[in-house]
Image (spheres, helix red, strand yellow):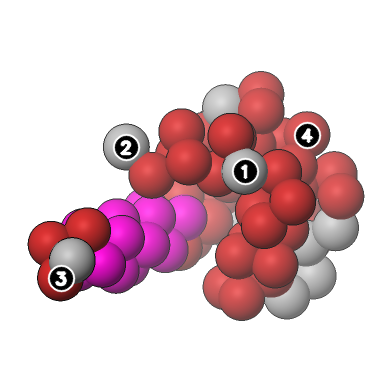
Amino acid sequence: MFWDHLLKSWQISLPIVRSRFPHADEHALDALQLGYHNFASLMAQTHDLTPREAVEEVEDWLHILHISEFGRSTAA
């Protein structure tokens, strides 16, 4: 799962998060480590989203990241 990659690569995680959630700050990295629901909750608070909208945005974002990662790994 791409979530694991985000947790392992701290130096690149924040720019990746900000590419979809521009108001994210270093607290987003803490929320990532605490789990999916904590991260979605923080994105709801910082991006004026309802909890459900935030979950949908995070799910879409992770899906896109997963597809792009899969494409890179199969292109080699």
Q: Secondary structure at mark 2?
A: loop
Identify the residue shown where x is 46% and y is 55%.
58
Look at mark 2 in the image and give the residue it sits on: 1
Judge depth for marks 2 and 4 and give the one in front. 2
Q: Tags 2 and 4 in contact by the CB under 8 Å rule?
A: no
Nearer the observer, 5 or 29: 5
Is 39 situated above or below 65? above
37 or 73: nearer the eye? 73
Q: Nearer the viewer, mark 3 or mark 4?
A: 3
Task: Measure how far apart labels 2 and 3 are at the Cα level.
Answer: 18 Å
Let me know if residue 46 is in the magenta part.
no
Residue in front for this viewpoint, 46 or 68: 68
Range of residues picked out in magenta: 58-72
Marks 4 and 1 close (CB-CB < 8 Å) = no
**Mark sitting earlier along the chain (3/4):** 4
For discs 4 and 1, the disc positioned in front in the rendered view: 1
* Amino acid type, residue under disc 2 in the picture: Met
Residue 31 relative to residue 60: left or right: right
Residue 9: numbered disc: 1
Name which of mark 1 and mark 2 comes first in the sequence.
2
- Which label is found at residue 75? 3
Query: Which quarter of the rendering shows the N terminus?
Result: top left
Measure the alpha-carbon separation of dots 2 and 4.
18 Å
